[in-house]
Amino acid sequence: MYQYDFSDLLVRVIIPGLADTFIMLFVSAVTCGALGFVVALVLVTTDPRGLRPNPLVNRTVSGLVSLLWALPYIVLAISLLPITRMVVGTSIGVWAGIFAITFAAFPLIARLLENSFKEVNPSLIEAARSLGATDTQITFRVIVAESVPSVVSQSTLGWISLLHYTTTAGLIGAGGLGAVALTYGYQNFNDRVMYGTVLILVVIVALIQLGGNALYRWIK
Amino acid sequence: MIEIRDVSKAFGDNVVLEKVSLSIDEGEIFGLIGVSGAGKSTLLRCINRLEPIDGGSILVDGVDVASLHKEGLRDLRRNIGMVFQQFSLMDRKSVYDNVYFPLRCRGDRKADADGKIREILDLVGLTDKIDSRPNELSGGQKQRVAIARALVSKPRFLLCDEATSALDPNITETVLDLLKEINRELGLTIIVVTHEIAVMKSVCTKMGLLSAGRLKAVGSVEHFFLKNPGLLGEFMSDAGGRLSPVPGYMTIRVIQPDQAAGTLLPELAISTGIAFGIVSGGIDRYRDTIAGAFNLRVKAEDIPRLTAELKARGAEWMEI
């Protein structure tokens, strides 16, 4: 067992790992957010009680979302590898990780947003219809606009889940803090690195939670 | 004018409306009354096609509501304001933005809409609450915002779905006064769905009674309250005001026409010298008139003299 110099490890491994984690976290938040938003709108709109009920579309999309959601992340990411290689050009690194995380996590984001959208009081939607609003106007100016506080409060859960995915992605070659903990901590029997990354992750989770709560109070 | 012809509607196997026909004239405040589940709210929603109908037709100013497509339907809805029991305001928007909403949906810019919004908020008496959020307002104020929102696109009809049922009685009165003012000053035709007696008496010019999806009766408010109180049996425990019969006596119902002083009965007793018992009844305000109806117990042999006197005084009566 070779003992690395800790400050060397910090600068050359942990900090780049943290940077990778943040890149994966923020980029996958954007991709999952966008994909999840579109899917959530499709689900809410085609719901039996939605603006344009469509059982076929609703059940198909809902089924796909549930299927992706049900697969364990590692299994999904590994089975996606050929596609990842085709799209990203490689199966390792941050961008390959983001690609797999997007597929694994957007169902969660879609369900979170769908639940928030469904919490909007149906009588508000009826009132908007009675006032001559189009379906698009109702969707964005009533359903989306009125569910913002609920979306914000749910989004802390989304961010924390994404953080889980980014660290797990590290186990199969995506880099980031997960890879650091695995390679330099666990496999190297280096407790300082191992529990150092744990500490860093705890701090990130706490910051997400505090930030989410503060934003919710401010926006409500 | 709104014409409802043979309208039927069912939710699955549950028949909510069955061949309802009704016409509502320009400038009326029409009360659709009935116990909950009678179908009155559904009928109201059929008028602006929030609910599609299964059979029959609804014509608003001669236009068949069912024939309209997207843009036409939105124009119809802009011409028919609607107010709900639970106010249905957007909590995250200010009073001003809530009222702006229908104009914004129509494509009006804020600068163009500003005058209309302020004018209508002035009409409902909420100028000082313009920047408040709905949750800072009382129930009555919220309903005023909802009324302003329904009126800002200058509709010719206003549908009120139990608009005062969630309000305290004294607040109800002020909202009803506002509705009467709107009806008088803007000439709006208003359709009020309600199960509250006070609402029917104080605003309606005409009423229609729905019972289990059928229209049981239509008529003036006086028709219901004074002449046919039995019709309202579902709402009033003492509608008939009948006591067990006494041998040798008859009960007649006397309708006292608009007579503010309310001295018909004593005048009757003095001029005829007949002693009669007042079984039930009273004088009440119906919209802007004061009228009353009394059930009197009279000796059978006195009936001809008493009714002759009633006829001479122009008062209606009926045996019950």
Image (cartoon, rainbow, N blue to C red):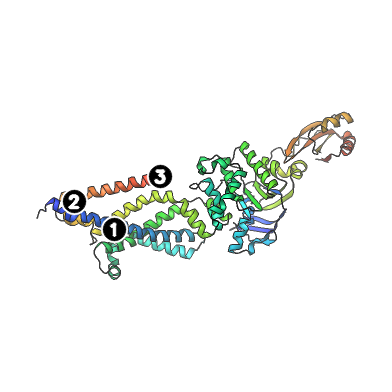
Secondary structure at badge 1 equals helix
Residue A29 sits in quarter: bottom left
Q: Quadrant of the N terminus of chain A?
A: bottom left
Pointer 1 indicates a residue of which chain? Answer: A
Residue B17 sits in quarter: bottom right
Q: Quadrant of the C terminus of chain A?
A: top left
Q: Amino acid at mark 1?
A: Met
Residue B41 vertical position relative to residue B278 in the rendered view, above or below? below
Label ID, residue A194: 2
Label ID, residue A218: 3
Pointer 2 indicates a residue of which chain? Answer: A
Q: Is residue B259 left or right of residue B127?
A: right
At a point 70% along the width and 52% down the height, the residue shown is B215
Foreground label between 2 and 1? 1
Q: Position of residue B117 (x, y in %)?
A: 58, 49
Q: How many marks?
A: 3
Q: Amino acid at mark 2?
A: Met
* First in residue order: circle 3 vs circle 2: 2
Q: Which residue is mark 1?
A: A24
Secondary structure at badge 2 equals helix
* First in residue order: circle 2 vs circle 1: 1
Pointer 3 indicates a residue of which chain? Answer: A
Q: Position of residue B29 (x, y in %)?
A: 70, 48
| Tag 2 and tag 1, C-beta contact below 8 Å | no
* First in residue order: circle 1 vs circle 3: 1
